[in-house]
Amino acid sequence: MKKIRRVVTGLLNGKAGIASDVEVPEIVLALAGGVTTVPLCGAATPPAVPNSGELAQAPKFSPPPGGYHFSVFSVPPMNEVLAAEPPADSGKAREEMEREVPGLLELMDPDVPGMHATTSIDFIVVLSGAITLELDSGVATVLHAGDTVIQNGVRHRWLNNGTERAWVAAVVLGTERFTQANLRFE
């Protein structure tokens, strides 16, 4: 299991300081073919700063307008996903996934594995490996370490057609959802 170090600053006795310095373990999402996530922080509303550095967790995977979450996730190569055994108890796996990433399952398209849309703007950075961003239009873009994506609430999924696990960081900002009729591409 990979652990991500999370250092948080805060205002301590009127001076800037390190409020916490911990390793946050990754969570394996058995129902998602071995995808892992490391939730680092989030909240339903933006905090005032400076503050003590105390962290909240976002109540849902797709935060409400003004809410946010910051996480790191990994996607195994597709050959590992296809070779993985399904969870022995799918009901328990669904419960675990809902507990670890609340609201993610309700965003998933039941007919296209991994395809989902959040009501958010997601700022993505590929940390290592290569990963494909596939949109519901069929457009697929391969991204490598250092590449970034600004994902504007459209249906998408992440696929790893490489040979090593891809690691990605995401800052997700909750927004309002407009209907398709409001969208214009020029």
Image (cartoon, rainbow, N blue to C red):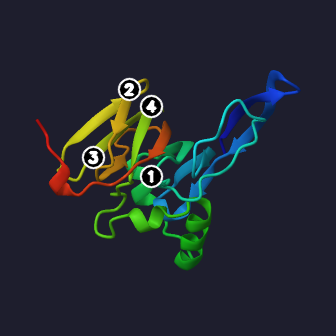
Which labelled disc corresponds to residue 80? 1
Indicate the amino acid at tag 2.
Asp
Instruction: Return the residue at label 4.
Output: 125
What residue is drawn where x is 25% and y is 48%? Answer: 135
First in sequence, mark 1 or 3: give its number.
Answer: 1
Crowding at mark 1 (Cα within 10 Å: few <14, some 14-19, many 20+): some
Instruction: Return the residue at label 2.
Output: 147
Residue 130, position as x, y percentages in the image: 39, 34
Name the quarter where the C terminus is drawn. Answer: top left
Instruction: Return the residue at label 3.
Output: 134
Crowding at mark 2 (Cα within 10 Å: few <14, some 14-19, many 20+): some
Q: Secondary structure at mark 4?
A: strand
First in sequence, mark 4 or 2: give its number.
Answer: 4
Crowding at mark 4 (Cα within 10 Å: few <14, some 14-19, many 20+): many
Q: Secondary structure at mark 2?
A: loop
In the picture, measured across the screen, residue 4 lies left or right of residue 172, that is right
* Circles 1 and 3: CB atoms closer than 8 Å: no
Q: Residue furthest left?
A: 186
First in sequence, mark 1 or 2: give its number.
Answer: 1
Indicate the amino acid at tag 1.
Glu
What residue is drawn where x is 52% and y is 44%? Answer: 73
Marks 4 and 2 sit apart, C-alpha to C-alpha, by: 6 Å
